[in-house]
Image: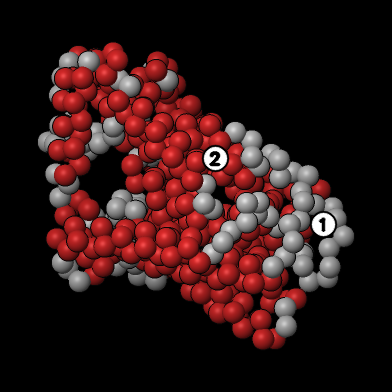
Amino acid sequence: MDMITRKNWLRFGLLVLAIYTVIRFGILGVQPPGKIPTDLLNFYVGVDRLNAGELVYQPKDWSPFKYSPTFLVLFSWTFYLLGQKLGWLMWCALSVLGFAWMADWLWRNAFPEQWENRATPKGHRLKGWQLSLLISAFFVFGWHGFIEHFSYGQGDFLIFTAFLGSVALVEKRRNDAIAALVLSVCLITKPQSAILLSYFFIRRKWTLLLSIGVCTVALLFSPALAWGWPRLLELFSQWQFILQSQSADFLTGNLNQNLAASLARLFNEREAVKFLSPMFLGLGAISMMVLTWFWKTPSTMAPQAVCRLVCVVLMFYSLVSPLSWRWSTFIWIPVGVICSVDAIVSRKRDALRDRRSSVVLLVLLGFFALNGLLIQKIIAHRLGIQEVDDLSRVGLYCLGNILLFAASCLVLRKYLQRNEKPVSSSNSRD
């Protein structure tokens, strides 16, 4: 398969995915009687309450609004103006198109030799059918995450796309100010997205991190210019209360697939999640600081190394985020492909001594693939598993995240050990 044709087939597949998802969840979703997903509907309810001077954060709600007051302002100026149906359609379209761009950017920059029409040493490139089969397999493994993400109307696609877009801007030295603003919006939307900033910490982007902090504080307090300080402080107090009132049952629900919640369910100690969650966050922060101290990253990294570090950070987020919903398995698609291609290509070209870690990596991914297959209802039902919730209750999704995180770390380590020089890509500017 010609390299240019291969690249176009990749983009065509991602475009088909985008169109299918927008039609199924966007266009068909707003047809009469119309059903706006619960989590997105909360944003409209929050703005309505704010405009009416009512209590915005109400703990008795079935699914309470838990975002910052500034997020309400931003939402009221954007999607809220479009109305619920058109707003959801645009939310859905931007989400899936953002994911398609993210997957395309990661795959092309992680393995430019797989997509570009260049002379590549034997063993450094997969055959067209192998690459197509690999991508198709991981679409199967991560498809459940797609369905659930849009069924709830979540915004993780947008958060991860904003993160990766910021990485692309910073690494190309284009505009750190835009990256800081985008990441600040992520923080006021979902505070736990601060975990993703570990990428820039490891890369020693101190000026950028300072800019993000200043911009985030400015955004959080900017509504005081319109509402006044008493009203804003009142909303902050309500927001803090709603976050602190989250019960152990909620934090350890089957949808939450982080390490803390999975262990608390496994040992039937639900209250332990309130201790385990900050513990894993703390251990993660310590690990990040140790890595930053001992690993002196260059000011400019090869696109391939950037992509592998991004994979590690994304899977790290899935494991330690206090609320790591199981639909984040859509991340398995680009990350799984990168890990698998690296393992297969390394096994082909490296000396026997270096192949051993590749074999370990492939074994890990084999177990991960089995878990991904069990998530599919058509297979689970044939094996006597009636509910996918039974799988998430025992932490199957968490196990998949653990395996893929381990694989991502091995991939990054192997790549850095090989000390490969950057491979330029005409498309890496996209």
Q: Quadrant of residue 80?
A: top left
For mark 1, give the secondary structure. Answer: loop
Q: What is the quadrant of the N terminus in the image?
A: bottom right
Amino acid type of the residue tagged 1 in the rendering: Met
Q: Is 126 on the left or on the right of 362, as rendered? A: right
Residue pictured at 40% horizontal, 64% vertical: 287
Q: Assess whether mark 1 and mark 2 are in contact (beta carbons under 8 angstroms).
A: no
Q: Is 295 on the left or on the right of 195, as rendered? A: right
- Relative vertical location of residue 233 with respect to residue 396 in this rendering, above or below: above
Q: Is 143 on the left or on the right of 334, as rendered? A: left
Percent position of residue 83, x then y: 38, 18
> Circle 2: is it few (<14), some (14-19), or many (20+) Cα within 10 Å?
many
Give the alpha-carbon distance from disc 2 to disc 1, as whole Å: 33 Å
Tag shown at residue 1 = 1
Percent position of residue 75, x then y: 37, 24
- Residue nearest the viewer, comparing 71 with 370: 71
Percent position of residue 350, x then y: 72, 78
Residue pictured at 41% horizontal, 31% vertical: 215
Percent position of residue 14, x then y: 63, 44
Q: What is the quadrant of the C terminus in the image?
A: top right
Q: Is 50 on the left or on the right of 317, as rendered? A: left
Q: Earlier in the sequence, mark 2 or mark 1?
A: 1
View extreme (right): residue: 119
Residue pictured at 58% horizontal, 75% vertical: 362
Amino acid type of the residue tagged 2 in the rendering: Ser
- Residue nearest the viewer, comparing 48 with 214: 214
Residue pictured at 84% horizontal, 68% vertical: 121
For mark 2, give the secondary structure. Answer: helix
**Mark 2 or mark 1: which is in front?**
2
Residue on which the image places disc 2: 166
Can see residue 172? Answer: yes
- Relative vertical location of residue 21 with respect to residue 271 in this rendering, above or below: above
